[in-house]
Image (cartoon, rainbow, N blue to C red):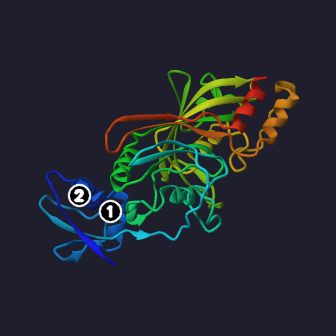
Amino acid sequence: MPSSIVTVTIGAEPPDRLDKALARFVPEEAHLSRSRLVRLIAEGQVSRDGAAVTDAKARVTEGEVFAITVEEATEVETVAEDIPLDIVFEDADVLVVNKPAGMVVHPAPGSPTGTLVNALLHHFGGKLSGVGGEKRPGILHRIDKDTSGLLVVAKSDAAHHGLAAQFEAHSAKRSYLALCHGVPDTADPRLRGIRGVSVEPGNTIKITTGLARHRTDRQRQAVTFTGGRHAITRVHLLERFAGQAALVECRLETGRTHQIRVHLAHAGHGLIGDPVYGGRRKATARAIGAEAAEAVAAFPRQALHAATLGFAHPVSDAQMRFEAPLPDDMAQLLAILRG
């Protein structure tokens, strides 16, 4: 397979490990993100003085020269499918899509077709750059199958590289709307006794923990305070419903798997409809009315929607901000709760 060589000379005051140093000093036109550099190092595609360096944590010094072998982008096996998309914005470099609940983002053994990637491949008509070493849409962040809302997709290597840097630096702004059990109010003394939960001005709850795979169920995530991936969620109370449920805005500082779902459950306010983390909590008809209690109990998915997305355009540097209204199912549940 054809390949090219990218030469990187380590500059002054380099980071203390190889992957970080390469990410800083690699030519911008190479469009190699740090995550891809880590993979190339592990694959033996990075060399110094003709010898492969396979340790991403290896020490580097100013003036050292590394050669990176980058193979030409390959075609992916995923089949393009003509699936309707709710496209919020598109130009030559990026696309923002409003994903419906029920759609998987990436093909997997259990869902090889009908995914967002299948739909995007058809929409782009094969006109893709070699994002991450494959000719595929560059999806920088994920949304669970049963969560709806906004996703940004890179259409070119330059866009992928620029957006990846923003997500790694946590400068991309994301907020979600959620309907949860109970009312996460900063005045609730119970919250102040939960490890990792703190209170900020503006009736905002900050949840700071590690997140790691559950010890016995590998499909779930669990809160941890020893290791795991650092995760921060801010929860702002928007509306309360008779003490039984609440509409909240959740802002992500990090973007870990199931982060909002796990963090709200940790705080004792699992999402309505969440079959994994929602717990057994129910809304009582006496407090909220029979119709609302039944609607809460019957809601078929986690009531979570990626409502806003903001980032700097990776090519023009223009500030971009997008909003997606609540999907019909959440809007109907909210109307019943209000009624």
> In this rendering, would 126 be left or right of 79?
left
Helix, strand or loop under label 2: loop
> Taking the image as drawn, is residue 238 in sight?
yes
Quadrant including the C terminus: top right
Q: Residue at x 38, y 49 (%)?
A: 93
Quadrant including the N terminus: bottom left
Q: Quadrant of residue 106?
A: bottom right
Q: Is residue 223 above or below residue 41?
A: above
The amino acid beneath tag 1 is: Leu
Distance (Cα) linking label 1 and label 2: 10 Å
Q: Residue at x 32, y 62 (%)?
A: 37
Helix, strand or loop under label 1: helix
Instruction: Name the residue carrying label 2.
Output: 26
CB within 8 Å, label 1 to label 2: yes
Q: Residue at x 70, y 50 (%)?
A: 276
Front-most of residues 276 and 8: 8
The amino acid beneath tag 2 is: Val
Q: Earlier in the sequence, mark 1 or mark 2?
A: 2
Residue 37 disc label: 1
Front-most of residues 73 and 282: 73
